[in-house]
Image: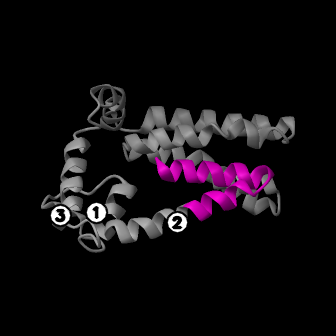
Amino acid sequence: IPLAFYVANQRVHWVNTWLARGYLMLAPIAIVLTSSRAGIVVMAIAFSGLPSFLRRQTPVTKLVTVLMFVVAAYLAWNYAPQQSWNRIGTLVTSLRAGDLNSRELVWQNGLRAFHSHYLVGVGAGAFQAGTQSCFDAHNTFLAVLVEQGLVGFSMFSVLLGFVVYSVTRLRGDERMMCALLLLCWGV
């Protein structure tokens, strides 16, 4: 979504602009259809950058953007199955319970596996085998820690540090887009 905001703002070619705007309309619908609660949270974070991206747009472009979001909301509201809305509706109760839909247990198992294989981890893509469960980590940082150990997690952290440093050196829309992308990815 932040990348689509950026591309729609560049006005390099009208096809690119309208493809990016179309994506901005279809992405929220797709997130609702997949019933992804994390997707809803990430979408809210991504859309927090919308005012920054719209600040230099013409009034007509702002109106078109708002109308596209109204159409997307209408389509999602009227055509998404009730089961999708029911699942998305459990987001607040899951956050209040503090267990994030029982992911806390998965993360505890991951930390136990890390303690057993703390230096080099259990191996790439072996989170389920390392934790002896059928669940994925649902957390990139924990997955890297368990699968790659301290060695891999250190390299991952250094690389991520360089990326964050590079983003701080950017200016304007590029900086906003990259910061939002990193924040969405981190969540």
What amino acid is labelled 3 in the image?
Ser
Residue 171 in view of the camera: yes
**In magenta stretch: residue 92:** no
Q: Earlier in the sequence, mark 3 or mark 2?
A: 3
Q: Which residue is mark 2?
A: 158
Marks 1 and 3: which is nearer the front?
3
Kind of residue indicated by mark 1: Val
Q: Secondary structure at mark 1?
A: helix
Residue 181 versus residue 171: which sits nearer the camera? Answer: 171
Coloring basis for residues = one colour
Q: Magenta stretch?
A: 161-187
Answer yes or no: is residue 1 visible. no
Q: Are marks 1 and 3 in contact (CB under 8 Å)?
A: no
Residue type of the residue flagged with mark 2: Val
Instruction: Pinpoint residue 3: horizontal percent, then vertical percent.
Output: 65, 55
Which quadrant holds residue 91? top left
For label 1, count other residues whose C-alpha is less than 10 Å away and answer few (under 14), some (14-19) or many (20+): many
CA distance for labels 3 and 2: 24 Å
Does 163 appear in magenta?
yes
Residue 95 as seen in the image, left or right of residue 170: left
- Name the residue tied to disc 3: 116
Q: Residue at x 39, y 70 (%)?
A: 152
Residue situated furthest left in the rendering: 132
Alpha-carbon span between mark 1 and mark 3:
9 Å
Please name the residue that numbered disc 1 is placed on. 146
- Vertically, is 120 above or below 42? below
Numbered disc 2: secondary structure: helix
